Image (tube, rainbow, N blue to C red):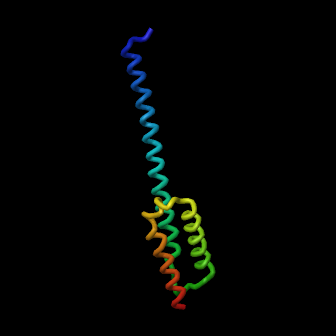
């Protein structure tokens, strides 16, 4: 038969493990949010990046892929989640439109 102290210790250990699982879920959510922000930043950088001396098909394909990725991300994310990254998405589009209008 277990003593009351042993039962209390086991109950405390179970509640601590439950709390640890909750912290893991919060860390996963924060990690995935950081990953999405990083992905948006990289796609935006690909769209902005341009070498005037090398106007070739590979440069265009990279920009198209970056645009498609950003479009897919904006469809999946909620409006509230898009607010912090809106400028990262809009600025490369502006740069792309302006560079196209100059030619």
Residue 32 location, x and y as percent?
Answer: 49, 53
Image quarter hosting the N terminus: top left
Task: Residue lying at the far left in this picture: please name it.
Answer: 5
Say which quadrant the C terminus sits in.
Answer: bottom right
Q: Is residue 30 above or below residue 4?
A: below
Between 86 and 80, the one lying in front of the other is 80
Q: Position of residue 92 (x, y in %)?
A: 49, 75
Q: Where does residue 56 sit, x and y in percent of width and height?
A: 61, 83
The count of marks equals 0
Residue closest to the far top = 1
Q: Residue at x 58, y 85 (%)?
A: 55
Q: As drawn, which residue projects farthest toward the bottom?
A: 103
The residue sitting at 51% across, 90% down in the picture is 102
Q: Quadrant of residue 69?
A: bottom right
Q: Please name the residue shown 45% across and 42% down the image.
A: 24
**In front here: 69 or 76?**
76
Q: Is residue 34 left or right of residue 70?
A: left
Image x and y of residue 59, in percent:
58, 78
Q: Residue at x 57, y 60 (%)?
A: 76
- Please say if 102 is above or below 21: below
Query: Which residue is at the far front?
Result: 79
Left or right, 10 with respect to 102, comes to: left
Whether 38 is drawn above or below 56: the answer is: above
């Amino acid at each position: 038969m277990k003593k009351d102290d042993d039962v209390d210790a086991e109950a405390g250990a179970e509640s601590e493990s439950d709390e640890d699982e909750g912290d893991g879920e919060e860390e996963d959510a924060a990690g995935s949010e950081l990953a999405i922000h990083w992905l948006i930043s990289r796609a935006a950088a690909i769209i902005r990046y341009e070498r005037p001396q090398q106007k070739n098909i590979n440069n265009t394909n990279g920009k198209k892929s970056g645009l498609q990725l950003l479009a897919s991300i904006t469809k999946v994310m909620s409006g509230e989640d898009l607010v912090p990254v809106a400028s990262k998405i809009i600025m490369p589009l502006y740069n792309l439109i302006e560079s196209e209008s100059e030619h």
